[in-house]
Image (cartoon, helix red, strand yellow):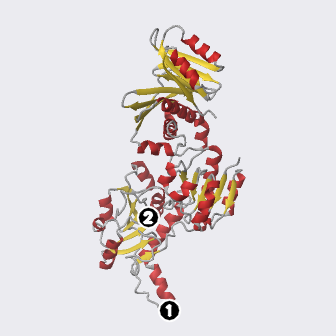
Amino acid sequence: MAPKVLVSDKLSETAVQIFRDNDIEVDFLPNLGKEPENLLELIHNYDGLAIRSATKVTEKILERATSLKVIGRAGIGVDNVDIPAASKRGVIVMNTPYGNMITTAEHAIALMFAVARQIPEASVSTHAGKWEKSRFMGVELTGKTLGVIGAGNIGGIVCDRAVGLKMKVLAYDPFLSDDRAARLGVTKVELDELLKRSDFITLHVPLTDKTRNILSRENLGKTKNGVRIINCARGGLVDEEALAELLKSGHVAGAAFDVFAREPATANPLFGLSNVVVTPHLGASTTEAQENVALQVAQQMAAYLNTGAVENALNMPSVTAEEARVMSPWLKLSEHLGAFIGQMTDEPIKAINILYDGRVSQMNLDALGCAAIAGVMKASNPDVNLVSAPVQAVERGIQISRTTQAKSGVFDGFIKLTVVTDTRERSIAGTVFSDGKPRFIQIKGINIDAEIGAHMLYTTNEDVPGIIGALGRTMGTNGVNIANFTLGRSGPGKAAIALLYVDEPVAPGVIAELKATGLFQNVSPLQFNVA
């Protein structure tokens, strides 16, 4: 059955057609986002939901979205999506952070010009029939120092444009490397130095606990007298009341804001001040940007629903289409390793440790880790997936760690998974052979080569005569066909294991019969999703 997507906000017909061109059934209901009760009644029918800002994806909506796999937001901001609730339900949330980068950066530059030359006030005055040429004395940008707080995607474009305007650019960004700063032509500084030296300051960071009120009353007091401040990033980055006071006193010569702490902003301390330029969150509001993000979100969602490729996800690692193709058997192996240990563990898990050896250590380890954790967690909750499993692991206080190492054995690469409880550690390792099929290659430190089937039986015992006979005889007399039979031991007369790949689930009566022989320390039926 073809995947089905609901578009509940306004996207272009070209974007909607992308779904159809990728064999995805789509319902285009652009006003449904404004009708939450109707959305609540329909959402269970869809695998994907494409939105802008009007649709509010609440926990209540997600509870009804029993088939939903992915939410695509055409744009950057996802304040209208309950991401923690989506993660718990295993729903991927994507946005389109690159489609409106240039548009937002250009808006910041435009506002900088506007506040430097008092263009809005001059326009209003001239429209009123006044000719107040002497009233609107501005300043040049050439030769001035611009402080850019956040030199990521949008901030980097602003830096580039400002350098082109012959401005001296300072950048504060803890993640900005020296090499990138050199390529941008900017000087990397700490925040206090930026505040002290900048004639203009522009913000381009997300709103997080660390960036909230980054321009606090204290930090605003550190700024150069006559500074002008531009914010096209997020409301909440600037103490608006403190800024209004400094604008009135003249310490801050001007400000230009496109975003506010509370939106829609119908009242704000900055409103009504003659040296403040304000716009109603227009950073992404160009024809080109709106079309770009619509096309991008449709392409991303179609790729995920058809190939498993994950791009610009906010609650799981991104996996490109090429990675999805190459990594598919390794993702399946990771899930199988987790499923084995998850089914063998009947006590609270304290830690999950994952070792990546050889060529697999160069792959997308975040995605492989999510698959392994999902395999472990499915034993207690079959509904978890790559998105929700890591969330549940954190909620349960499970410590996750990973290690990488160069090729250390006969295999080009392998994954080893270890689970720690209060009483023991369990480990299993696996690899992918050239035929693309995952194999178990070690259990409890005992080397094996086991094909993985949907139905398996795992036993442990001492290495004594009669084990193979007991297993074969019991399976045969109960009509259980063995497709593959793998044995391993740590040494003659020492610990031994057997892993049987059978055609159907092993009945409890057969398990009891094997245990009654007294030959086995453990007899465990296992199930794996090999589809």
Residue topped by disc 2: 234
Q: Give whichever of 275, 258 is nearer the camera.
A: 258
Q: CA distance from mark 2 to mark 1?
A: 36 Å
Whether residue 65 is visible, yes or no, is yes
Q: Give whichever of 80, 153 is nearer the camera.
A: 80
Amino acid tagged 2: Arg
- Tell me the quarter of the image containing the C terminus: top right
Rendering quarter of residue 142: bottom left
Amino acid tagged 1: Gly
Q: Secondary structure at mark 2?
A: loop
Q: Nearer the viewer, mark 2 or mark 1?
A: 2
| Residue 273, percent from left and from top | 38, 80
Badge number at residue 239: none
Residue topped by disc 1: 129
| Residue 473, percent from left and from top | 61, 13
**In contact (CB < 8 Å): disc 2 and disc 1:** no
Q: Secondary structure at mark 1?
A: loop
Whether residue 9 is visible, yes or no, is no
